[in-house]
Image (cartoon, rainbow, N blue to C red):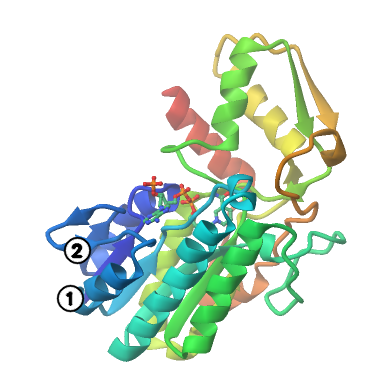
Amino acid sequence: MKILLLGKNGQVGWELQRSLAPLGELIALDRHVVGGLCGDLTNLDALRETIRQVRPGVIVNAAAYTAVDKAESEPELADCVNGQASRVMAEEAAALGAWLIHYSTDYVFSGQGSMPWQEADPVAPVNQYGASKLAGELAITASGCKHLIFRTSWVYGARGNNFAKTMLRLAKDRETLSVISDQIGAPTGADLIADVTALAIQQVMHSPQLAGLYHLAASGEVSWHGYACHVVGLAQSCGEQLAVKAINPIVTTAYPTPARRPLNSRLNTQKLRENFSLHLPDWQSGVTRMLTEVLNK
Ligand code: NDP
């Protein structure tokens, strides 16, 4: 089986290079042209041509426009990468009879309330990034291609920039940190997402009725403030020299950003766990593992 991976160097893409490798022949692209193949999601014609040339049995799309604040001033670009390119992949997957595996976000929801979002809950994105990711989801489902869409949240990886690493860096320089305490979600490892993806692909090949939309996040919940405290506490227990003496909780309204953020990023993962017989570990274990790797302890 041929697998075409797009966005191979993102947090999730990097881990997918590892987890997909045993499943088949992996053709992994970033945005550059290599051997006549183009993985640039702003070049829709070249993307279409690339899929026709490779003729994969599975397309895994880990590429995305993920700059949430910047998307407010670049909505067309966000829509092209997250919406239109997803449509092209879906159309080509449908024509080939291939599977399309795609990632989306809890930012398709309004962020209201405190219940974990279920797959069928009404969507109402509060920013351009969320709207562009929703456009991608809708294009895929409308295409009729065989697909899995995983909505995830608060992604981190040992490779790439993420909140935990930023907190670690700031904690080395500053005595006081102020971190948002009223946005709640579950930090989810790129490695977990990639492993679940590989397991789900294997199962869905034999049980195509499992196709569809799933919520994929680590278990448990925490605020960004609680997450920061966990990161700093762990670094201290590993003997890191940190300047930080206080981590103050602040509310979202005290930290204005170009893009609005949903307060409730909780995802209900029951459908994924039950349909694929999977266990999703708690967020702390994954974060601890990633930090141990980053701190080289
Ligand atoms: P990253 O930002 O780490 O990686 C995104 C990748 O997409 C990068 O390698 C980037 O390449 C690539 N990319 C961006 N624009 C283009 C383009 N025009 N053509 C080709 N490649 C492009 O994202 P994650 O791995 O964290 O995210 C994976 C998925 O999970 C995405 O669908 C995202 O929307 C979703 N998600 C992410 C969350 C998060 O917290 N990060 C939360 C919820 C969902 P380059 O480095 O060259 O820019």
The amino acid type, in three-letter code, at marker 1 is: Gln
Query: Vertical placement of 293 versus 199: above or below?
Result: above
Residue 37, labelled with which disc?
Answer: 2
The CB of the residue at mark 2 lies under 8 Å from ligand 1: no
User: 10 or 135, which lies in front?
Assistant: 135
Residue at image position (69%, 31%) is 228
Give the SS element for disc 2: strand
The quadrant of the rendering that contains the C terminus is: top left
Q: Mark 1 points at which residue?
A: 53
Q: Would residue 26 be found to the left or right of residue 168 on screen?
A: left
How many C-alpha atoms fall within 10 Å of the one at disc 2: few (<14), some, or many (≥20)? many
**x, y percent for residue 40:** 33, 59
Residue 106 visible in the displayed image: no
Residue at image position (33%, 58%) is 19
**Mark 2 vs mark 1, CA separation in Å:** 8 Å
In the figure, residue 232 lies in which quadrant?
Answer: top right
How many C-alpha atoms fall within 10 Å of the one at disc 1: few (<14), some, or many (≥20)? few
Residue 248 visible in the displayed image: yes
**x, y percent for residue 34:** 17, 55
Are dots 2 and 1 in contact, CB under 8 Å?
Answer: yes
Residue at image position (39%, 77%) is 88
**x, y percent for residue 29:** 26, 57
Name the N-terminal-most of marks 2 and 1: 2
Query: Vertical placement of 269 versus 121: above or below?
Result: above
**x, y percent for residue 146:** 42, 86
Q: Would residue 116 be found to the left or right of residue 108 on screen?
A: right
User: 36 or 174, which lies in front?
Assistant: 36
In the figure, residue 208 lies in which quadrant?
Answer: bottom left
The amino acid type, in three-letter code, at marker 2 is: Leu
Q: Would residue 278 be found to the left or right of residue 284 on screen?
A: left
Give the SS element for disc 1: helix
Query: Vertical placement of 16 versus 197: above or below?
Result: above
